[in-house]
Image: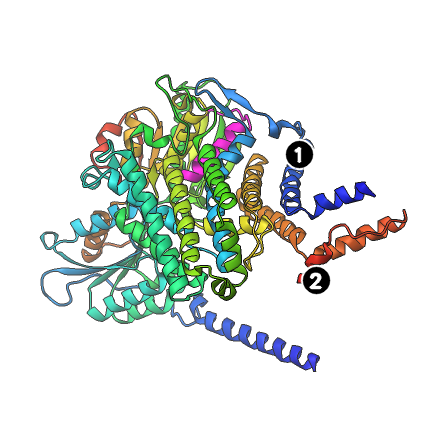
Amino acid sequence: MNFQKIAIGVTGVALFLSLAACAGDPVDKETPGGEVSTEEGYNLVPADTNGDGLITLGFAQVGAESGWRTANTDSFKSYFVPENGYELVFADANQDADKQKQDVRDLIAQGVEVINLAPVTDSGWVPILEEAKAAGIPLIVSDRQLMVDENLYLTYFGGDMEGEGKTAVKWLKDYIDAGAIADDINIVHLQGTIGSTAQKGRTKALDDAAPGYSWNIVAQQTGEFTRAKGQEVMESIIQQGLDFNVIYSENDDMTYGAIDALKAAGIDHKEKIIISFDGNKSAVQMVVDGDIDVIAECDPLLGPQIGGLIQDAMAGKKIAKITYSVEGFIDSTNAAEKLLTAFGS
Amino acid sequence: MSETNVLKKIVRNRMFFPLVCLALVLIINMIVTAAQGGSPLSFFEVRMIAETGTLAGPLITILNRASELVILAVGMTLVVSCTKGADISVGSVMVLSGAVSIWFLGFGQLQANNYHVSEYVVPYVVGLLAALIVGGICGLWHGFLVAKLKIQPMIATLILLIGGRGIAKVVANGQINHVDVPSYRWLGNTIQNADGVNPLLLPTPIFVAAFVVLVAALLLKFTALGMNIQSVGINDRSSRILGLNSVRIIFTVFVICGVCAAIAGMIATSRISSVDTQNVGKMIELDAILAVALGGNSLAGGRFSLAGSVIGAVTIQTLTTVLYSLSVSPDQLPFFKAIVVIIIVILQSPQLRPLLDKGVARVKNLFGINKQLFTDPQEVNQS
């Protein structure tokens, strides 16, 4: 009796699992040679198909979760205007991946002439990209990369996280070479949310460079991109009595937290070399004030640059599959000027 | 004979297992520190930071960082005891209270000032009161849903778990709102006099948490509230028949819980002198429930121990601080936390105690003693 019940239960679970696996399959089938035809390549180019004199851009945005994102949206809204020859249809996914897929389908149904997609997640996009392609609408992926066949979209455009890390590393190298520090370099490394694109790229740049320059990474902990965690982790690092002279913090919020913790411990943060990422307005102000030494920029103002790409494509130029936004760094030499255009709060 | 009785008393005390858990975490820390070549006692060192006049050290950090959780655990214990459920909205109520108070402090000026409050538009006290009132209103709402509409507490509070953070985002206009007034940091960090020295010697949140625990303890000791809460938790209907106003009591515990969440929210936003609606109090409701459970309280309501929950909250923070101080690599952090929590929860299981007794009995048989140590015969009969 009991045995029967167990047998039925096990069969049921197995059946459920196999169903679940089936349901998952089509979404993950992103390998060339499957349902995706790779032979024809991608030959769609933005064009004024409805002849109204304006290119209609449908923008499927992630949401409005940060100052960076708000600035990103604003750059699209201010660039893709009739004066520049565009019309913008904006769809906010509110960080909901399923809603965003529906958003893109709506954009296709509305017959926009080019789609810019800033994806919430990097998987499950193949059927929708195929729909856009079948409808003859060129699609640009921005901000976050998709793990799909490159014949499904026109181009990827966005920030190069590892490149930003390299910018920061190079700045530190130059700063040391200029004779600013004679001591050993002992780095406290505050990482972003483990597994995020920004964390992986920015961490890799430092991990790759440190041994070659014989820099010591004395502590490596995640502050989860938040001020509160950055503060708490820095507090514990200080308590361990570790000797350090450089802080490599993978975003501005954690940098604020780390400085909070240094101040609370009675340590003069201006004596440490503090490296941050992104470039929010408050952080740039702190560079001006000498609290932060350098910020590797993560540029949210992608609108005009994507506009440039669309113009190039329409002019018949060959578009690279991956284009990175041009990003520099902000230090005492250019902070005052950068403050005027800095994003966020 | 009398020695065994004393031992029995200690072991059967409700505080025994929570304290064992706390000790366990500290012992693990000492062993690992010693294995790494450090002094096993380095964790217990307390020193004075001359520049700020504040005591510092891992123990101070634990008490400081545990403050929000301790305050939440006080409210949560009462809710669990009275309603057999939990208030899972406390994290969202925290962030909502914080956002509303900053909205008042920078009234009308926030957007123009790029989401910075450089000087208070209304006095700080108004902001603080606004936060407490928001917490209280959230509590009234939960009381209404649970006591009047008889909705399960978990479902009733799920509404604000999801919605509260959403409202907070609207209040904060989707941005991180900063407060640049130096005194705003006092509640969550240290008070500073004109010389930048802290006259209180310790971080402020420790005092706030101690105050909340003290007020709650006095309230429970010198009024019938504690007994009423337990009575409603054990049997709502018979309490009503006995003449207790169970509706009012349920309202009361949720309001207390909401106000506790608001206090915790004020501390959390003061720590970082900003309200980050995305991250403040994220998942903290689970830690608060865990604190109650680690404190030896039954999540099925009824009898409760406030001290146990406080120890539970401190244990959770001790674990986090210990893992940080041992430089556990970030991707392994949740793994170690999970292992320790599993061990602690198993140790707390009432089913394990007879087993422990059997083990102890086997050893004791060698010496001719045969007494149950861990199991209270009465408790077993009840369950």
Residue A228 visible in the picture: yes
Instruction: Using a 10 Å C-alpha cutoff, classify the residue at mark 1 as few (fewer than 14 neighbours), some (14 to 19) or many (20 or more).
Output: many
**Of the residues tagged 1 and 2, which is closer to the observer?**
2
> Which is more toward the observer, A293 or A8?
A8
**What is the quadrant of residue B122 in the picture?**
top left
Magenta segment boundaries in residue numbering: A226-245
Q: Are marks 1 and 2 on the same chain?
A: yes
Mark seen at residue B213: none
Q: Position of residue B18 (x, y in %)?
A: 62, 45
Q: Amino acid at mark 2?
A: Asn
Q: CA distance from mark 1 to mark 2?
A: 39 Å
> Which is more toward the observer, B29 or B9?
B9
Residue A325 visible in the picture: no
Q: Chain of mark 2?
A: B
User: Is disc 1 placed on a helix, strand or loop?
Assistant: helix
Residue B79 vs A267, above or below: the answer is below
From the viewer's perspective, tell me whether residue B25 is left or right of residue B212: right
In percent of the image, x 37 and y 16: which residue is there? B195
Residue B231 vs A288, above or below: the answer is below
> Which is more toward the observer, A247 or A307?
A247
Mark seen at residue B30: 1
Q: Which residue is mark 2?
A: B381
In percent of the image, x 30 and y 54: which residue is there? A63
User: Is disc 2 placed on a helix, strand or loop?
Assistant: helix
Q: Earlier in the sequence, mark 1 or mark 2?
A: 1
Quadrant of image for the C terminus of chain A: top left
Q: Chain of mark 1?
A: B
> Which is more toward the observer, B316 or B155?
B155
From the viewer's perspective, tell me whether residue A214 is left or right of residue A70: right
Quadrant of image for the N terminus of chain A: bottom right
Q: Position of residue B84 (x, y in %)?
A: 51, 60
